[in-house]
Image (tube, rainbow, N blue to C red):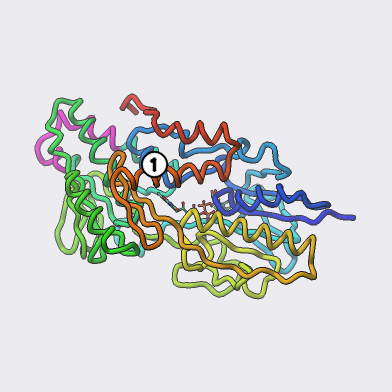
Amino acid sequence: MQKRRIVIIGGGFMGVKCALELSRANLDNTKIRLITDKSNFEYHGALYRLVAGKSPMEVCLPLRDILDESRVEIIIDKAIAIDTKDQYVTGESGSTYNYDDLVLGLGAETNYFGIPGLQENSWGMKTIDDALQLKKHVIQTLQMCPAQDHAERTKALNFVIIGAGPTGVELAGELGGYAKQLIANANLDPNLVNIVLVERSDRILPKLHQKLSKKITKRLQKLGVDVRTSCIVESLENDVVTLSGEPLSSSTVVWTAGVKANALVDQLGAEQDRMGRIKVNQYMNAPGLENVYVGGDIASTQWSGMAQTAINDGVFVANAIRRKITNPDSVARIYSQKEPIYAIPAGPAWSGTQFGKLNFFGRTGWMLRRLVDWVVFINFLPFGKAWAAFRSHYHVQDDNTC
Ligand SMILES: Cc1cc2nc3c(=O)[nH]c(=O)nc-3n(C[C@H](O)[C@H](O)[C@H](O)COP(=O)(O)OP(=O)(O)OC[C@H]3O[C@@H](n4cnc5c(N)ncnc54)[C@H](O)[C@@H]3O)c2cc1C
């Protein structure tokens, strides 16, 4: 009898969690394949620290460390086409992968909303590659400062971060301290470093409690960040970013403000929301495609866009497939939304954390943030490796050179 083929695409929070759970279920006569375009799992929540010279160990977890003991076959390939009629996926390598059940955890892509010059000239913050390139650029830019004239140096020391969601806030809080340290090493005044955080809404972290926004704004201002709300980026050309009509010269503009679903999901032909995410049904299927499951950032659910949601989705989908195989006559469970914990660091050892209706700030918030980090690591790694990844937070990787 032919084995039942479960194909999972995407080696991120959703895909890997689903693969782990399916492997643990020890299903007879099934073959689980994880197709992903990278050999590492990326913990995005710690990317901002990588930009500021911290160890990549915390961010970059080899898939083999996670799945070595499992029954999952890892295939490094980029899926480029999905045929839902004949049930196969085509990879960039030319290989095809037939499936009986398909799980999609493809994650999000950057959305530049067509703002002139932004895609070509801004720095991204979505992947380890983005973070490492940005770090290298920051170091190189600051190294040139001592030999520059006033105008060039001002441009080099203006760092503009667009988007005051969690990513923008985390980066703004960390980058200032790092840039100041580098510039002081070059015997220049650290106060010349200017971090500008730009937000279109009338407050930072607009999706979170107002109190949290206020406290974190104050904290960032204390760290010297210039927080500009109700401010719109209009263009980025020739190292000049125009913010609500005002030009600002800057060598470093980081775009963290827009995401959309991975474009591969367009091929499903299922209904999508304005961010391109699939409007999944209550079983996390793409409507009309009972054996295609969609989760994480590409599913249009209330708390989509958060790692904790993607982990929950991975568990839910694994359970749904397991039930279908082991107990097909039972009633299928219905997806339920779970509000994630938002833990937003703003500078070293300080976090604003929203846990349901409760808010925590400062050191307490930070300890909760570290707890969230730990939960992520222990969800994916065996205890020893999870502890090593957790501890690596305290390692400075860097000699501040490129
Ligand atoms: C900078 C940053 C900070 C964040 N901080 C937090 C935080 O603190 N807390 C929180 O809860 N959430 C945070 N998030 C959000 C969180 O990372 C995402 O919600 C989560 O990664 C979504 O999981 P996913 O599995 O849907 O996608 P991902 O984790 O992005 O995984 C998608 C995977 O699919 C692979 N892939 C993509 N296309 C293909 C293809 N065609 N073929 C094969 N493989 C493919 C990708 O390489 C990747 O491995 C942050 C995100 C960013 C960018």
Q: Left or right of 2: which side holds 276?
A: left
In the picture shown, does residue 225 fall above or below 65?
below
Q: Looking at the image, which residue sits at the far right?
A: 1
Placement of the N terminus among the 4 image quadrants: bottom right
**Does any portion of residue 234 appear in the rendered image?**
no
Q: Left or right of 194: which side holds 85?
A: right
**Does any portion of residue 40 appear in the rendered image?**
yes
At numbered mark 1, what does the secondary structure look like: helix, strand or loop? helix
Where is residue 254 shown, x and y percent of the image? 30, 49
Q: Looking at the image, which residue sits at the far left?
A: 150
Which amino acid type is marked by label 1?
Ala
Where is residue 105 shown, x and y percent of the image? 58, 56
* Residue in the image at 54% along x and 69% along y: 278
In the picture shown, does residue 137 fall above or below 288?
above
Q: Quadrant of residue 104?
A: bottom right
Counting labels gives 1
Placement of the C terminus among the 4 image quadrants: top left
Residue 154 is a magenta residue: yes
Q: Does mark 1 have its CB less than 8 Å from ligand 1?
A: yes
Q: Give the residue pinned by disc 1.
A: 131
Where is residue 347 shown, x and y percent of the image? 28, 42
Front-lying residue, 111 or 177: 177
Residue 129 is a magenta residue: no
Q: Left or right of 259: which side holds 121?
A: left
Query: What residue range appears in magenta?
Result: 138-155
* Residue in the image at 70% along x and 70% along y: 332
